[in-house]
Image (cartoon, grey):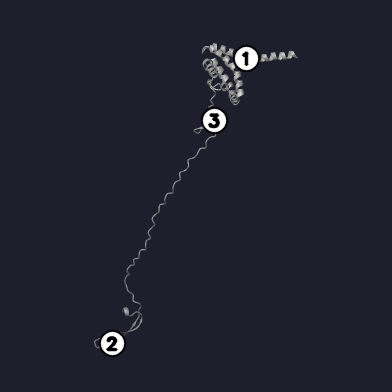
């Protein structure tokens, strides 16, 4: 049928050749023209590729340094103090054998007073030169320094009390001159003269006032 015969039906075909012409009636049974052959493959267009996003590296967060753990300071008990994080015993300095003569210093007004220097020389050069004298001074200092600071403060605050103490201790200071007769380092002489001085002071400060008081009491009673 060719491309002109698309639908089935009767067709009139005319032939012309020179002056001759003829017609032929044709009943065409058919359909649409079919073109044989495989169609060219259609290449699908590539889909547009979306570029993958570049991986973003997160910025590191600023690191805050952790605070160092603080160790609480220990609580020190009585008689101790904190030194370099350790509780240590507080050493209380006891009055040494060569400590000051507090009562005499306050009574005479200065450590440079002759009476005070004399007492210090007798103690350090004579009494402390022997083992018995050192033992005596060790026990005496424990007793003496237990009350002497209080009496010395009272002397400095009250001039009348200072004068009374000066009068009271002057005889005792005078009796200590006996100790100058002892040779330094002689146990026998220091011990013997020391006992003599103690006995003399007991007689002056205790026995004599007691004897005087006893006699005065007898005189008063005899007059009644």
Q: Which of 51 and 70 lies nearest the eye of the viewer?
A: 70
Q: Secondary structure at mark 2?
A: strand
Using the image, determine if residue 25 lies above or below residue 96.
Answer: below
Which residue sits at x=74%, y=13%?
Answer: 223
Within 10 Å of the Cα at label 2, are there few (<14), some (14-19), or many (20+) other Cα atoms?
Answer: few
- According to the image, label 2 marks what residue? 22
The answer to whether the residues at label 3 and label 1 have Cβ atoms under 8 Å apart is: no
Q: Secondary structure at mark 3?
A: strand
Q: Secondary structure at mark 1?
A: helix
Horizontal side of 86 relative to 12 (left or right) equals right
Residue 101 point in image, percent of width and height? 55, 21
Distance from the alpha carbon under mark 2 to that under mark 1 = 193 Å
Mark 3 vs mark 1: which is more N-terminal?
Answer: 3
Horizontal side of 58 relative to 190 (left or right) equals left
Residue 216 point in image, percent of width and height? 70, 14
Instruction: Please identify, in this view, whether the residue under mark 3 or under mark 1 is nearer the observer.
Output: 1
Q: Residue furthest right?
A: 224
Residue 139 point in image, percent of width and height? 57, 19
Instruction: Please identify, in this view, whether the residue under mark 2 or under mark 1 is nearer the observer.
Output: 1
Using the image, determine if residue 46 lies above or below residue 14.
Answer: above
Residue 203 point in image, percent of width and height? 63, 13
- According to the image, label 1 marks what residue? 204
Horizontal side of 13 relative to 129 (left or right) equals left
The answer to whether the residues at label 3 and label 2 have Cβ atoms under 8 Å apart is: no
Distance from the alpha carbon under mark 3 to that under mark 1 = 46 Å
Q: Which of 35 and 68 lies nearest the eye of the viewer?
A: 68
Which residue sits at x=60%, y=21%?
Answer: 163
Q: Residue furthest bottom?
A: 19
Task: Using the rendered view, name the quadrant where residue 221 is placed.
Answer: top right
- According to the image, label 3 marks what residue? 80
Mark 2 vs mark 1: which is more N-terminal?
Answer: 2
Distance from the alpha carbon under mark 3 to that under mark 2 = 148 Å
């Amino acid at each position: 049928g060719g491309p002109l015969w698309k639908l089935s039906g009767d067709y009139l075909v005319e032939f012309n050749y020179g002056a001759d012409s003829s017609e032929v009636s044709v009943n065409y049974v058919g359909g649409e023209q079919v073109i044989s052959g495989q169609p060219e493959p259609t290449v699908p267009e590539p889909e547009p590729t979306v570029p993958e996003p570049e991986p973003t590296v997160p910025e590191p967060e600023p690191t805050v340094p952790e605070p160092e753990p603080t160790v609480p300071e220990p609580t020190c008990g009585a008689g101790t103090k904190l030194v370099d994080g350790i509780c240590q015993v507080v050493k209380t300095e006891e009055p040494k054998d060569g400590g000051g003569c507090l009562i005499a210093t306050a009574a005479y007004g200065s450590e440079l007073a002759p009476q005070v220097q004399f007492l210090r020389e007798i103690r350090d050069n004579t009494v402390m030169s022997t083992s018995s004298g050192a033992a005596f001074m060790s026990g005496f200092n424990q007793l003496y320094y237990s009350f002497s600071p209080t009496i010395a403060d009272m002397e400095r605050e009250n001039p009348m009390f200072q004068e009374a103490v000066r009068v009271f201790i002057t005889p005792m200071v005078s009796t200590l001159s006996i100790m100058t007769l002892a040779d330094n380092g002689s146990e026998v002489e220091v011990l013997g003269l020391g006992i003599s001085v103690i006995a003399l002071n007991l007689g002056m400060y205790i026995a004599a006032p007691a004897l005087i008081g006893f006699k005065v009491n007898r005189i008063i009673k005899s007059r009644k």
